[in-house]
Image (tube, helix red, strand yellow):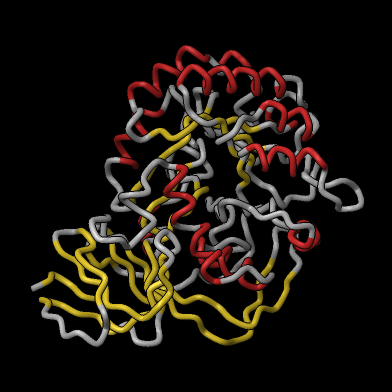
Amino acid sequence: MYDFVLTNGTVIDPAVGLNDRRNVALQGGRVAAILDPNVPVVAHQTLDCSGLLVVPGLIDFHVHVFPGVSNFGVDPDETCLARGVTTVLDFGTAGGLIFDGFRRFVIDAAKTRVKALMLIAGQGLISSNDTKPALGELWDIAYCDVEGCVEAVEKHRDCVAGIKVRCMADISRGGLNEAEGLRLARQAADETKLPLVVHPANSTLTIQHILETLRPGDVLTHCFHDKNCKLVDSATQLWPIVREKQREGIQFDVGHGWGSFAWRVVRPMLDQGFDPDFLGSDLHSYNTNGPVFDLVTTLEKFLHVGMSLPDVIRRSTATCAKWLGMSDEIGTLKPGACADITVLDVVECENPLTDSEGFTEIANRRLDVKACFRAGNRVGVLPKPDARQSRI
């Protein structure tokens, strides 16, 4: 007698190489068994998933979920869990000075599983271009206190997965503090023995400078932007160092966002054999009503450009779980794993997909979230938000 069984769905679990029709049995918040659909089962509750995909709970590798404190922050349960995402990685919204509050009011309070990067700047992402004052976190380099960052990591090590720095001209006195901010973030990552994660878009530094700072296991996000410090030259050819560093083990995140995903860059890079490791949405308050909407919309875009469905699922489940050091717990449906599950429907239709620069392509299918389970409990799902003019 199982608690719940999802029956007759096509189970895609890249972590174990499964892509076939199966029943998924849940017991005590865990995956109890993956069963032949022709064998009768007894359960307190069942859900018929005929014609649907049953996949491990989706993991969004790049979000900002500190509402009320950061102007970027959104509620993880409303914008992620209700859209089929059971685990998120907050991408450095909080630094050491405000991480206690982030832990108390978001990580410990949300139904969504929240892991986080620690921003090297202690004050976190509390201001931006449209705030008063419009000062970014590297405007005063004194906030990049390595000792304070390390202390905050040690206090919250169970939920901190890496150190984050944004290298951007307009948040660092026109680029004056970028190199020093990057150096200090590298130092904090080394002292905590955590990966370093870097945002390069609109940096005054060269991409070569940033990539030479990274080490195997580190991550460069926003890999498909078309701004200063990008991965391609003026002819949209990959810089040689990009291939070199990816072979060495540096990993790359999409980080779509409202300004970091351009169709005119995506296609040439993919054609040259560049594959992102993570399909993070960079969901935040400026793009929940377009062009990002949710993680599923980002997944649709990679299906549209030719990535296979199992590869799309792998890059939003197993690959993320491995980087987080949680491969036995999430990102898979193998027996014993946490019963985080997303049920999707692949709908054949015309599906307009807009990049961060306002250019729209028409895909021929979309992904609808039909059901979601967090630790064996079914949660409500919400429809994709309506598109409207974004805040920027």
Residue 44: x and y, percent? 10, 76
Q: Of residues 34 and 166, which is closer to you in this image?
A: 34
Residue found farthest to the left: 1
Q: Of residues 88 and 336, which is closer to you in this image?
A: 336
Numbered-mark total: 0
| Residue drawn at point x = 65 percent, y = 23 percent | 182
Q: Of residues 205 and 142, which is closer to you in this image?
A: 205
Q: Of residues 130 and 237, which is closer to you in this image?
A: 237
| Residue drawn at point x = 76 percent, y = 67 percent | 359
Residue found farthest to the right: 235
Q: For residue 300, which quarter of the picture? A: bottom right
Say if 193 sits above or below 279 in the image.
Answer: above
Say if 176 sits above or below 147 in the image.
Answer: below
| Residue drawn at point x = 87 percent, y = 46 percent | 233
Q: Is residue 204 left or right of residue 382?
A: right
| Residue drawn at point x = 44 percent, y = 18 percent | 150
Residue 294: x and y, percent? 51, 62
Q: For residue 244, which quarter of the picture? A: top right
User: Which quarter of the figure is the N terminus placed in?
Assistant: bottom left
Residue 59: x and y, percent? 44, 55
Residue 52: x and y, percent? 40, 81
Q: Is residue 91 left or right of residue 243?
A: left
